[in-house]
Amino acid sequence: MAAPLALACVLTLSGCASFSPDDGMDKVSTLSRERTGHGVVAQRSQADADAAAARSAEILKAPLTADTAVELALLNNAGLQASLAELGIAEAELVQAGRLRNPVFGFGRLAGGGALEIDRSLMFDLLGLLSMPAATKVQQQHFEQVQLEAAQATVNLATQARLAYFNALAAQELVSYFEQVHDAADAAAELARRMQKAGNFSALEQLREQSFQADALAELSRSRQAATAERERLTRVLGLASFTLPEHLPELPAEPMAPQAAEQTAIDRRLDVLAAKRRAEASAAALGLTRATRFVNVLELGYQNRSERGATSLAQGYEVSLELPLFDFGMARSVRAEAVYQQALHRTAETALNAQSEVREAHAGYLSAYTLARHYRNEVLPLKQRIADETLLRYNGMLVGVFELLTDAREQIRSVAASVQAQRDFWIADTQLQAALGGR
């Protein structure tokens, strides 16, 4: 009786496994902070939700910046919290892999002819015990892979928040400029109508001003709709609707960024590349486990005893249960594991190649956007301002009419709007480059 009890104790102790105190979030938060400047918390209690709400209220006291928009998204986006819940699932599978299946107790009673036999058995999963270290290693690698994927989801959300922020801010700013164009068009159209009525303006010229007024109104309507749509996109990313945006986009940096060894940086830092590598490693470990247990699917060891009515002693012994590979030799499982491993290798190579290509493309777009935005700031806008100043001098000297003055004002406003769009495109390109590099 002592040997079976000792075996049961060993099996029970070997199956002990516990959950980590941080639920795997410390690594995810660290990876996120390194790449976005902000950590992330899985809100699994009311205290976590209250802390997020308090921090959000503090941020919302001032107009948003790109960084505070990212922080709000990490605090309030429900989709991100759903992604972080994958950590709990993966950790549960890891803990389960470190625990044995529950023992199976069997009881049999056979009576007849005045005799009574009672069989008792207690079966343990011996194969589970033998393969537990390998199975736990596979699940540990899977858990680490899920951590990388959770961090990647966090970084992706930060990128979406920055893109939505710059789009919403630029759309809001453009509305004010198109309102100025519309006001100038209204003034010109009204002046043209009065002058045509007084006989000092041709009907054709008056119709042209009226047509421009109609176009300006349509353009203003489109810009207002675009501003509404972009703000709602930002709302969905942030996970809340009440926020204030500043009046203008950030200024351009003094010099464009010149990342050193950009392609290697992407390979080293991008979480999708790291997750693909971890997935390939987990597949390799699973392949080894599959090959090791290919022929032995079920192996159980247990204690058994038998008693008979009237017998003076208790018959006892052990029982081994082994599944015989008569029909299923494990070939299908082994072939499947090898195919999964080959698939993971190819996915990893593809991810690394795409990462390098995306960095080159993003950096080229970044430099192009910076050059164009700087051109508008340093060349186009000063030139339009000089033209407007010269036209105003001539108007004051009665050398040009009011319509020439209004036309130049409209053109200047349009150039400012184009400059805002170029500035927006630069910040979008900057965000895309940071994402391609794997973070800040």
Image (cartoon, rainbow, N blue to C red):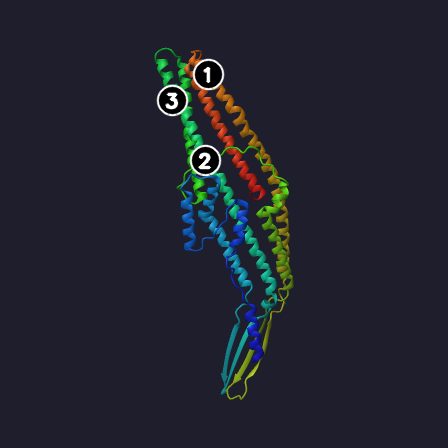
Image mark count: 3
With 85 as the anchor, is 2 left or right in this view? Answer: right
Give the alpha-carbon distance from disc 2 to disc 1, as whole Å: 32 Å
- Quadrant in which the C terminus appears: top right
Q: Taking 193 as reference, is 280 above or below it?
A: below
Q: Secondary structure at mark 1?
A: helix
10 Å crowding of disc 3: few (<14), some (14-19), many (20+):
some
Percent of width and height locating residue 307: 53, 84
Q: Is residue 2 visible?
A: yes
With 376 as the anchor, is 335 left or right in this view? Answer: right
Give the alpha-carbon distance from disc 3 to disc 2, as whole Å: 26 Å
Q: Residue 77 bears which disc, if any?
A: none
Q: Taking 367 as reference, is 312 above or below it?
A: below
> Residue at image x 52%, y 69%?
102
In terms of sequence position, does the residue under pointer 3 or pointer 2 come before the other? 2
At label 1, which amino acid type do we have?
Thr
10 Å crowding of disc 2: few (<14), some (14-19), many (20+):
many
Kindly identify which residue carries mark 2.
169
Kindly identify which residue carries mark 1.
391
At label 2, which amino acid type do we have?
Leu
Percent of width and height locating residue 398: 42, 11
Q: Secondary structure at mark 2?
A: helix
Q: Residue 186 bears which disc, if any?
A: 3
Q: Is residue 219 visible?
A: no
- Quadrant in which the N terminus appears: bottom right
Give the alpha-carbon distance from disc 1 to disc 3, as whole Å: 20 Å
Q: Quadrant of residue 235?
A: top left
Q: Nearer the observer, disc 3 or disc 2?
A: 2
Q: Evaluate if marks 3 and 2 touch, with contact meaning CB atoms under 8 Å apart.
A: no
In terms of sequence position, does the residue under pointer 1 or pointer 3 come before the other? 3
Percent of width and height locating residue 246: 43, 35
